[in-house]
């Protein structure tokens, strides 16, 4: 298991910082893990799962 920082999450997903936090607030994006008082990271596999789900959603919409 690997933890990744916001900069990497943004790079991998193509999302802006504000969008990442909006999606978290909306309950549609993985929550970060607290590493300390002002330090968080995301579980890389959860981010990958979110991306795979988006791809599957696209494919379902395309096939419909």
Image (tube, helix red, strand yellow):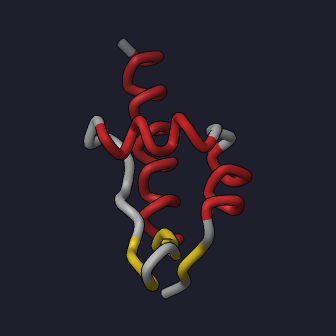
Residue 12 lies left or right of residue 51; in this view the side is right
Counting from the top left corner in percent of width and height, residue 58 is at: 47, 26
Residue 56 lies left or right of residue 3; in this view the side is left
Counting from the top left corner in percent of width and height, residue 61 is at: 40, 18
Q: Quadrant of residue 64?
A: top left
Counting from the top left corner in percent of width and height, residue 12 is at: 68, 53
Q: Give the residue drawn at x 61%, y 60%.
A: 6
Q: Quadrant of residue 28?
A: top left
Residue 43 higher or lower than 6, as above or below: below
Of residues 62 and 32, which is closer to you in this image? Answer: 32
Of residues 33 and 45, which is closer to you in this image? Answer: 33
Q: Quadrant of residue 17?
A: top right
Of residues 53 and 40, which is closer to you in this image? Answer: 40
Residue 12 higher or lower than 2, as above or below: above
Of residues 31 and 52, which is closer to you in this image? Answer: 31
Q: Give the residue drawn at x 51%, y 60%.
A: 48
Q: Give the residue drawn at x 62%, y 39%.
A: 15
């Amino acid at each position: 298991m690997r933890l990744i920082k916001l900069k990497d999450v943004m790079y991998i997903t193509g999302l802006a910082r504000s969008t990442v936090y909006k999606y978290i607030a909306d309950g549609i994006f993985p929550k970060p893990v607290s590493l300390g008082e002002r330090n968080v990271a995301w579980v890389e596999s959860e981010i990958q799962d979110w991306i795979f789900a988006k791809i599957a959603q696209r494919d379902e919409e395309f096939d419909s």
